[in-house]
Structure formats: structure tokens, C-alpha cells
């Protein structure tokens, strides 16, 4: 399985190549080196580029500039492109902190704000990033989300508060939002939810709504909160125009489960690299399955 662009092509070229072919790039979040390396090993195995994301909380934990250094080192080690995204970022200062640290893209998340406030925040971020591009010559992609899908990557008994059918992205607002903000990528709410449900099936995705939105906007679309969704729903979303798919909770759970299984069998083990390795192996199973699915 070959990736669609040679290493060295820009991030946006890679995304547009996948969009044109009707395939999707995989985006996985990390909060330590074990997880980042597991993702990169699978990406190399499948010869596919991959996006590694770090949220505000993950960046705070790992260090904003340290993450950039780690991804630079991994790009030297692995023979596939590894792109770095500043996931869900809630303020202009945090946007610029990530951009100035050299991240390839940033997601400006004002989805919980009233519509006009969301537009204003995202437009201010786009303007600031474009000014940064003029000064540095570095292309940085800006993504934004419309329609609330929750904020926590966790296991939940019920839907997060504020997530409902009423908050699905409408076609009219999607078109208005993309035009007024000037974003490079758009993340709609189509039934997707951050986190995973433990006592109920994941909500089905509204593929019909996604198809309607695709007709009125041309920027690449991104599916957030895809942990727990069925393969059928994810494939249908990609066929309907999704170009990047985010998974976090599902790989976190796999990583945790691998470590817990090892520690249950070796309760006196205290070397993190030993139980971390088992976490990696469980996580790689999920990463591998998702990346293969997105390229079907």
C-alpha cells in the first residue's frame, strides 16, 4: 500500500491528494513517546503519512516545544511524513504559542461559543496565522469546528452535556462559517462525539447531512470524535467527503488495557518500558485497523 504523495510534499498537498482520491488521513493524539512511536511504526509498516495531534492538555503535559522536537526526530527516523497538529485550541494566545513553536496546523475550537463569537475567534486566529506566514514563509493550516460534540476524551455512560441533535452543523451555517473565517479545513458535527460510550452504542453518523455540507463547501473536511464509531459509518463518512479522521479515546483505552493486562500478570514489575511495550502493542492493533480502513 503506497501513500499518495512522496515524502517532502507539503502538508496541504498531502491532504488534497487524499481528498481527490476519496481516501482519508489518520490523525491520532498522543501524550507520551510510547504512543507516538507506536503510531509511527504502523505508519511506516503501511507506508502511509500520518498526523499526530496534541491537545492543549497534552501539550501542557509534554511541553509545547518538546513535542515539536520529538516529531522532528521521528521524521528523521521514519521514512513516511509525520505531521504535527495543535489539536483543540481555545484561545488566540494558545494558537500562536503552537504556531510559533513550529506546528504544521492548528484547530481553533470555539464550538461551545455562540455562533458569532465562534466566527470572530476563528477569523482572528486565521488572520494572525496568515500574518505569521507572511513573516516566516512557513505554511500553517487552520481548522475550525462548528457544532458541539463535547470536549473530553473519556469513557462515558451517557452523551456529554450539551451534545444533541439540535447542535448538528447546518448546511447554511457551514457555508457561512467557511466563507467568513477563511479556514483551510472544516470539522462539522454530524453525530460524532468526543469520548466513547460505555453503556450504549455510539450515535450513528448523519451521512446525509455530511453529503449536503459537501455540496456547499470545498475545503477538506475533518471528522472528530470518531472513537467507537463502526467501520461502516467511518467508511461512509469518508466516501461522503471526510479527508481526515481523528481517533484518541479508542487508542488511549487500548494503550491502557495493554499495560493493565501486563501488570495483572506481573504485579511486581515496575519498569515502565516493559508494561509500556504492551500498551504499544495493543494500541498498534487499533492504529493499524483504522489506517487500513481509511485507505479502502
Image (cartoon, rainbow, N blue to C red):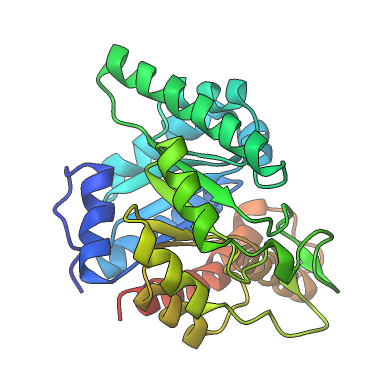
Report the side of 46 relative to 247 (left or right).
left
Residue 66 at x, y percent in the picture: 51, 29
Residue at 36%, 69% in the rendered image: 241
Residue 109: in sight, yes or no?
A: yes
In this view, which residue lies farthest toward the left? 6
Residue at 59%, 61% in the rendered image: 169
Residue 213 at x, y percent in the picture: 44, 65
Q: Nearer the viewer, residue 186 or 208?
A: 208
Report the side of 56 relative to 72 (left or right).
right
- Can you say whether 257 is above or below 15 in the image? below
Q: How many marks?
A: 0
Q: In which quarter of the image is the N terminus?
A: bottom left
Residue at 30%, 12% in the rendered image: 135
Residue 158 at x, y percent in the picture: 84, 73
In this view, which residue lies farthest toward the front? 172
Q: Nearer the viewer, residue 74 or 58?
A: 58
Residue 229 at x, y percent in the picture: 59, 78
- Can you say whether 160 is above or below 64 in the image? below
- The quarter holding residue 212 reads bottom left
- Can you say whether 122 is above or below 272 in the image? above
Report the side of 184 relative to 65 (left or right).
left
Amino acid at each position: 500500500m503506497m501513500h499518495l504523495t512522496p515524502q517532502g510534499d507539503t502538508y496541504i498537498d498531502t491532504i488534497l491528494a487524499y481528498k481527490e482520491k476519496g481516501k482519508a488521513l489518520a490523525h491520532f493524539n498522543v501524550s507520551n513517546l510510547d504512543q507516538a512511536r507506536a503510531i509511527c511504526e504502523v505508519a511506516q509498516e503501511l507506508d502511509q503519512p500520518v498526523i499526530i495531534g496534541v491537545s492543549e492538555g497534552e501539550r501542557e503535559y509534554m511541553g509545547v516545544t518538546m513535542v515539536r522536537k520529538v516529531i522532528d526526530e521521528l521524521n528523521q527516523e521514519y521514512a513516511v511524513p509525520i505531521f504535527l497538529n495543535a489539536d483543540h485550541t481555545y484561545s488566540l494566545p494558545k494558537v500562536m504559542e503552537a504556531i510559533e513553536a513550529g506546528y504544521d496546523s492548528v484547530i481553533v475550537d470555539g464550538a461551545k461559543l455562540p455562533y458569532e463569537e465562534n466566527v470572530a475567534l476563528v477569523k482572528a486566529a486565521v488572520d494572525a496565522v496568515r500574518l505569521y506566514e507572511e513573516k516566516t514563509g512557513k505554511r500553517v493550516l487552520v481548522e475550525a469546528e462548528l457544532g458541539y460534540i463535547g470536549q473530553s476524551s473519556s469513557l462515558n455512560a451517557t452523551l456529554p452535556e450539551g451534545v444533541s441533535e439540535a447542535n448538528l452543523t447546518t448546511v447554511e451555517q457551514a457555508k457561512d462559517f467557511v466563507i467568513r473565517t477563511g479556514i483551510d479545513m472544516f470539522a462539522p458535527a454530524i453525530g460524532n462525539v468526543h469520548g466513547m460510550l460505555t453503556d450504549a452504542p455510539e450515535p450513528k453518523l448523519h451521512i446525509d447531512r455530511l453529503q449536503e455540507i459537501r455540496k456547499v463547501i470545498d475545503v477538506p473536511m475533518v471528522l472528530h470524535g470518531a472513537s467507537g464509531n463502526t467501520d461502516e459509518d467511518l467508511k461512509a463518512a469518508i466516501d461522503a467527503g471526510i479527508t481526515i479522521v481523528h481517533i484518541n479515546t479508542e487508542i488511549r483505552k487500548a494503550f491502557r488495557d495493554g499495560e493493565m493486562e501486563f501488570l495483572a500478570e506481573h504485579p511486581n514489575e515496575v519498569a515502565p518500558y516493559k508494561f509500556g511495550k504492551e500498551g504499544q502493542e495493543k494500541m498498534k492493533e487499533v492504529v493499524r485497523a483504522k489506517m487500513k480502513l481509511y485507505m479502502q
